[in-house]
Image (cartoon, helix red, strand yellow):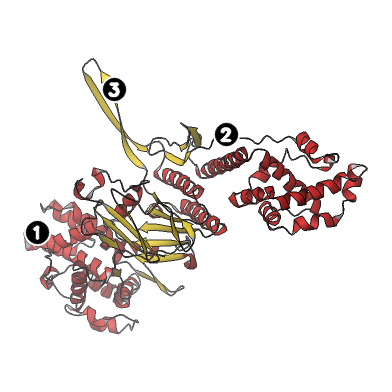
Amino acid sequence: MIEQIRIQNIKGFGEPQIEIPCTIYPNKINLLVAPNGWGKSSLTTAIDCIKRNKLDVPKEFKHQQDENKSSILEITIDGRTYRADSGSNSITITFRGNSISSTIGCYAIHCDIYVKTTSRNVGNRYQVAAGHLAVTSIDVMGKVPPRAEINYGYNEVKRKFGGNGKILTNLDDRLDIILSKIDDECINALNRFTAKKRVALIEEVVHTINSLGGTKDHILQNIPAEILDNLNTDEYFIAICQKLNLDGTKFETFDIVYQLIQVYQADSANFKKTIQYISYKQFLNRLNTNIGMVNSTWKTDIRAKEKDEKLIVEFPRADVISNGQRDILTFTTRLQAFKSQLKDNKQYLLVIDEVFDYLDDANILAAQYHLKDILNYAATLSNTKVYICLLTHIDPKYFRSYVFGKNGLKVCYLKQVDAIASENIKAFISFREGLDKDNNEDDKNLYDELSSKCFHYHPTLPNCRIDIASRRKQNVLETWGEADNLLKYLLCELNNYLQEKVQYDPYAVALAIRIGVEKKVHDELNNLEEQSEFIRIHKTNDKMDYAQSKGVIIPDALYVLSLIHNQSDHLKYDTIRNQYIEKPVVYKLNHPIVKHIVATLFGYKEGEEIGLDKLH
């Protein structure tokens, strides 16, 4: 497992080293959860800055843009720490451990948008610059392997075999398919047939077949089965057959392996280059097929192309295609590029920065397929570990449940904050929502009392404890309908939230914010008449609009908070599923900007608690 990641002097992470509290499992999807502003992009930037021999962090990515500060990235895997800094890099070089040669290949996927500027001359003296949003081109695999082709000649193979070479199969039409299955292990096995003992085995079979007479069919029918037995028990002959998935007759298997041995021995260097080129062409076809499947834009020419000896995918300007189209196209391409790097006996770290937070449902499924495909492919390799990390600000309780199965998903909270709604607050909110205010007068009166004095700011405290108790709803605290009992609970959770306690109730905080906003605006109105009218208005935004019409300056930040608290008080209970229909928006409270706005609203000072006078 990856047990620790430490970063120093990269973007938001300064000194001393920031230790990312994570445990990352190989060959699973690791969901690393942290609020916006925590520093997730600092991690992806650190990965991006890893070069062959050092950690190369440009000034703009240094902490506080101080280029004199030393940047460091450390990754600890199974007790061993690998480090990259400005002068060295042990993260992406080969090392020996437990007799396994291994490499940590680091790869990051994030937003591919950047500003591109162009200039043109105006007259003889001036230049006019114009900018637009562009999408970063993707170098899929570095240098493209040179074109290579095996000089296979059927007539030459027959001649070399001898008088009965006519019984061999012409492989012209299927040679590329056969060669595409060959890997380093298979090449090693082919090379073993230069040994005297294996040369003798081949010559024995060839000599026996050439001693037979008659037609091609007659010869095939009369080949002694026992002459192939020794070959069929040779470990390297077996390895070749298994790699090529050969399951024909004994002679059909021998026929193909024999011809491969001859072709390999005739020009082994060109044989290896041909294998690489065939693998490249297959990858190129798969990549362009996958791009075509997710390309819903009108730009049909988005595909991988060779350019300056590299395989590049270029995208149109960001304003030409939609954000969703761009995200899935670049994401799919980068995943395919990552997959092309996977090799036996290696370790790979893939960090994906918030891509899943913004994809729509259809693109989520496509992205899921490609991630699963990478893990499935890695499982076919020998001793290969792939650490896939999805960085997200979405709590996994509200992450789309169909994206990954529970067994394949590991969750790690980078910031140890648990926004856990109490059963009492959820029950209290849904209790009001469940009142039959349209058909029952008593329910309507209780609904109005709760709405005005518990769910909005009101100078008078509620007095409906008996009415709540008479309805006997589970987990509903009737004491919250009397005096300042509810406000005290809200205030306690609000202080927990601002003091960054490990746990707080997000619904209570959201409701406290609403009441605090309304009280602040109410108190700034000019007179009792305006304040009374403010209280009579039902919705918070309508209340603020009214106050604004009376000359009260309403900061835009208060309207931002309304996006959270306006949903928090409309929680309903699903009686069919026996669960609350949660409002994920309240979990946006962890965003540092939101927290700063709330702290400013209540005049919060570090080390001090907010008093009840901020709510009543």
Which residue position holds label 2? 147
Disc 1/disc 3 C-alpha distance (Å): 55 Å
596 displayed left or right of 173: left
Q: Amino acid at mark 3?
A: Arg
Q: Earlier in the sequence, mark 3 or mark 2?
A: 3
Question: Circle 1 sits on which residue?
Answer: 525
Q: Position of residue 450 (x, y in %)?
A: 24, 73
Which numbered circle lies on residue 120?
Answer: 3
Q: Amino acid at mark 1?
A: Leu
- The 10 Å Cα crowd at callout 1, few under 14, some 14 to 19, many 20 or more, is some
How far apart are the alpha carbons under marks 3 and 2? 40 Å
Q: Quadrant of residue 563?
A: bottom left
Compute the Cα span from label 1 to label 2.
79 Å
Q: Nearer the viewer, mark 1 or mark 2?
A: 2
Q: Position of residue 288 (x, y in %)?
A: 54, 40
Instruction: Please state which of residues 362 and 63 is positioned toward the viewer in this rendering.
Output: 63
Which label lies toward us, 3 or 2?
A: 2
State whether residue 456 appears in this view. Answer: no
In x, y percent, where is residue 326?
42, 43
Front one among 479 and 612:
612
